[in-house]
Image: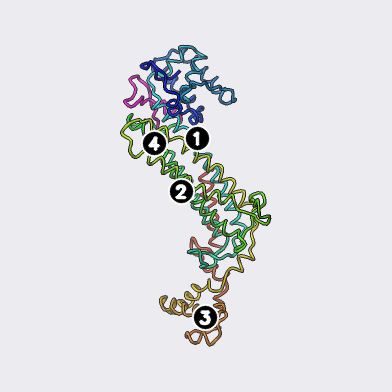
Amino acid sequence: MTLWGGRFDAKLDPAAWALNASLPFDRRLAAQDVGGSQAWAAALRDAGLLSAAEYQQIASGLEAIAAEFDGGTFVFAEGDEDIHTAVERRLGERTGALAGKLHTGRSRNDQVATDFRMWVLEALPALDEALCGLQSTLLDLAEAHTATLMPGYTHLQRAQPVTLAHWLLSHFWPLQRDRERLADLRQRTAVLPLGCGALAGTAFPIDRTALAEALGFDEPAPNSIDAVSDRDFAAEFLFCSALCGIHLSRLSESMVLFTTAEFGFFELSDAYATGSSLMPQKKNPDLFELARGKSGSLTGLLTGLLVTLKGLPSSYDKDLQEDKLPVFTAADTLRTILPVLAGALRTMTVHPERMRTAIDPTLMATDLAEHLVRKGVPFREAHGLTGQAVRAAAEKGCGLDQLCQADWQALGLLEADLLPVFDPLASVEKKSAIGGTAPQAVLEQIQNAKIKLRKGKGE
């Protein structure tokens, strides 16, 4: 059985059938296809195209099919081309020729676009929950380390001291933007294509506004040609997923570095690390490396769909069958990665002493320049004098705080006045403006983050 064979007198070539069929992946739309068909049957009844008895028979059949999918007892047939064919074929087995009335005024073009949008709408809350889980872990760790010092880096070079909490929160906010983008995507996804037919609309008096409300959409699509071919929501979903993957990759890259023996800032739990088949001593951050690698795959999924879409003429084209697998894959990837990273962070051991030891006095060079500014020295001159002091310390092979009185006097500075500048905690505490790394500013940041997290959850 196919939904289109009336004008053909030969079966599709087996190899062509294998290429054409989408059931191997669109079977994931089973619940959405049945749900959309139930709403469509009700719309046909309301339009006078199904009697109350016919509607009840079809609705009962679809309800039974939904139960089969839920219970894992639905049996696909060899001739099922796609999920739509499978559902209609099974409905025919239950209701006979009456099943043929269900497709009145409907095309697979508007049907699959509706199913796909429904799937994405249902996937968004699950992704948001997974993102919240990782954010919550970062927040919990930040609260425990508001006064734990570590070197901050730019260009992967030690730059200025920061608190570990501040560094952790630097990964909270990109995830918050990811959640906001996904939430914003909902309004452009919740536009109903059903009732647009193949491309020209339906010739029957279907109340598409009521249909949209019944299926949880915000509104019906305003143009039938655009509606059956619009996959902006899929591309946008993949963009959000790819950017989220990049944020996870940046976090993972830092974790890979900070768990090395050279850094030793963190140690992963055995439950979230792997070993080597040859080297018994190894404890590898494979899960973070896999997350880093998956970001490339997520970017590839986005690029692939954009290239597919770019050359299509108006209305529906079979190329659009390539839209679902990348979206399914992206959603699955993120739903797999996010809880694993949250678990790895939640169970890791932090080594504050290693981080504190890595704070070289040179990291307070900016504090020295700012100290001079407070004494009335123009910043550019203070910057130059501090740079000379850094060079002098490097030439002597000593720390910036170990220059002798003669060295400071050669620069026109007083040694006794400078020693407090090299206290990393004092350095951190000075950064108390909004967004700064001072413990008090970080505590305010944590409270703000908690509010964002609660609001995003709808609390």
Q: How many residues crowd around disc 3 within 10 Å: few (fewer than 14), some, or many (20 or more)? A: few
Q: Which mark is residue 231?
A: 4
User: Which residue is located at x 41 percent, y 41 percent?
Assistant: 304
Q: Earlier in the sequence, mark 4 or mark 3?
A: 4
Q: Nearer the viewer, mark 1 or mark 2?
A: 2
Mark 1–mark 2 Cα distance, whole angstroms, equals: 20 Å
Residue 459 in the image, given as x and y percentages of width and height:
54, 43
Can you identify the residue that label 3 sits on?
Answer: 395
**The one of 56 and 296 positioned closer to us in this rendering:** 296
Determine which residue is flagged by label 2. Answer: 243
Which quadrant, please, contains the N terminus? top left
Circle nearer the N terminus (1, 2): 1
Query: Which mark is first along the chain, 4 or 2?
Result: 4
How far, Cα to Cα, is label 2 from label 4? Answer: 18 Å
Judging by the rendered image, the residue that carries numbered circle 1 is 122
Along the viewing direction, whichever of 146 and 97 lies nearer the viewer: 97
Of circles 1 and 4, the one toward us is: 4
User: How many angstroms separate mark 1 from mark 4 (CA)?
Assistant: 17 Å
Give the side of residue 279 with respect to residue 38, left or right.
right
- Is residue 15 depicted above or below 50 in this figure? below
Neighbour tally class for label 1: few under 14, some 14-19, many 20 plus, Cα within 10 Å: few
Q: Are discs 3 and 2 less than 8 Å apart at CB? A: no
